[in-house]
Image: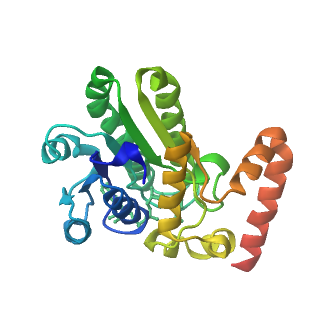
Amino acid sequence: MVGAVQGAGVVVTGAGGGIGAALARRFAAEGGRVVVNDLDAGKAKAVADEIGGIAVPGDASAIVAEAKDALGGVVDVYCANAGVGSGGSEAAPEEVWALAWDVNVMAHVRAAQALLPDWLERGSGRFVSTVSAAGLLTMIGAAPYSVTKHGAYAFAEWLSLTYRHRGVKVHAICPQGVRTDMLDATGSAGDLVLVPTAIEPQDVADALFKGIEEDRFLILPHPEVAGYYEARAADPDRWLTNMNHLQQKWEAAQ
Ligand SMILES: NC(=O)c1ccc[n+]([C@@H]2O[C@H](COP(=O)([O-])OP(=O)(O)OC[C@H]3O[C@@H](n4cnc5c(N)ncnc54)[C@H](O)[C@@H]3O)[C@@H](O)[C@H]2O)c1
C-alpha cells in the first residue's frame, strides 16, 4: 500500500484496456478514487464499473476539467497513458504523424496546462507519463512512434526538472513490449524486438508503484533497458550499428 495514493483523485487516460486499465485497477486497489478515460466509451465504462471508478470518455487531450469535477475539484494524480502505435517510416502519411504528435505528446502538454495552476498553488501533484523504451532507444520500423515518444520523454523530463522543488512529482514509464492490443498491432518488427521479452500490463503497474515508493522519475519495467540506454549514451555510433543490424535482420525476415 502506497500512502500517497490512499483517497487520492486519480485520472488515467486510455484506460479502457491494456496498460491504462492495469494502472486504473492498481490505483483503485490502493485506495485511489479513479477516473477512467478512453476514446472508447464502452471500454471506459466497463473498467470504471469493475473498479468502482468514474468513466469520463473522450479524447485524452480535453478531459481534465470534466475529470476534476467528477473528483470533487481536485486531481492528485494524472496518468497520461493514452497513446497511438503509429508505425512507418519518414514516408508515413501526414495524418499519421499528426495523430502521433497529438496523442503521444500534445495531450500531455494540454493536460499539464490544465493541471499545473492548481498543483503549484497547492504545492503538490503527480504526473505519470506512459512513454516507452522507444522514447529512450528508438523502435525499428516506427519513426512517428519513436520521435513522439522521445518528445513525451523530453516533456516529462522538463516538467520534473522545472517543478520538482514546488511539490510536483513526475514519473516516466518506459517499458519495452507489454502484452496489449498495441503490441499485437506492431507486426513483424514487434515480433522480433518486443514479443520475446513482453511482460503483462500489471507488471507495469507494479513497476510504477515501486517507483512511487522509491520516489524515482524513470520507471523501467524491463530493467535491462537501463543498460541499453547507457550504451546508447556512451557510444552512439556503436549503438546505431547494433540497431542497424537489427534493422537488417528485420528486413531479411520480411
Ligand atoms: N504495449 C506495449 O508494448 C507498450 C510498450 C511501451 C509503451 N506503451 C505505451 O503504453 C500506453 C498504453 O498502450 P497499451 O499498450 O495499453 O495500448 P492499448 O491499445 O491496449 O490501449 C490504449 C488505449 O488508449 C485509447 N486511446 C487511444 N487514443 C486515445 C485518445 N486520444 N484519448 C483517449 N484514449 C485514447 C485506446 O482506445 C485504447 O483503449 C501507450 O502510450 C503506449 O504507447 C505500450
Q: Position of residue 2 (x, y in %)?
A: 43, 49
Please name the residue shown 53% across and 65% down the image: 203
The answer to which of 32 and 217 lies nearer the viewer is: 32
Q: Position of residue 211 (x, y in %)?
A: 54, 47
Identify the colour scheme used.
rainbow
Q: For residue 53, what is the image quadrant?
A: bottom left
Is residue 202 at all visible to an observer of this figure? yes
Q: Is residue 46 left or right of residue 161?
A: left
Q: Position of residue 45 (x, y in %)?
A: 19, 67
Ligand 1 falls in quadrant? bottom left
The image quadrant where one finds the N terminus is bottom left
Q: Position of residue 213 (x, y in %)?
A: 51, 45
Q: Is residue 13 left or right of residue 128?
A: left
Q: Is residue 98 left or right of residue 134?
A: left
Please name the residue shown 69% across and 54% down the image: 225
Please name the residue shown 47% across and 37% down the image: 170
How many numbered marks, from 0 up? Answer: 0
- Is residue 51 placed above or below 77 in the rendered structure? below
The answer to which of 161 and 122 lies nearer the viewer is: 122
Is residue 86 at all visible to an observer of this figure? no
- Is residue 250 placed above or below 239 in the rendered structure? below
Please name the residue shown 44% across and 73% down the image: 181
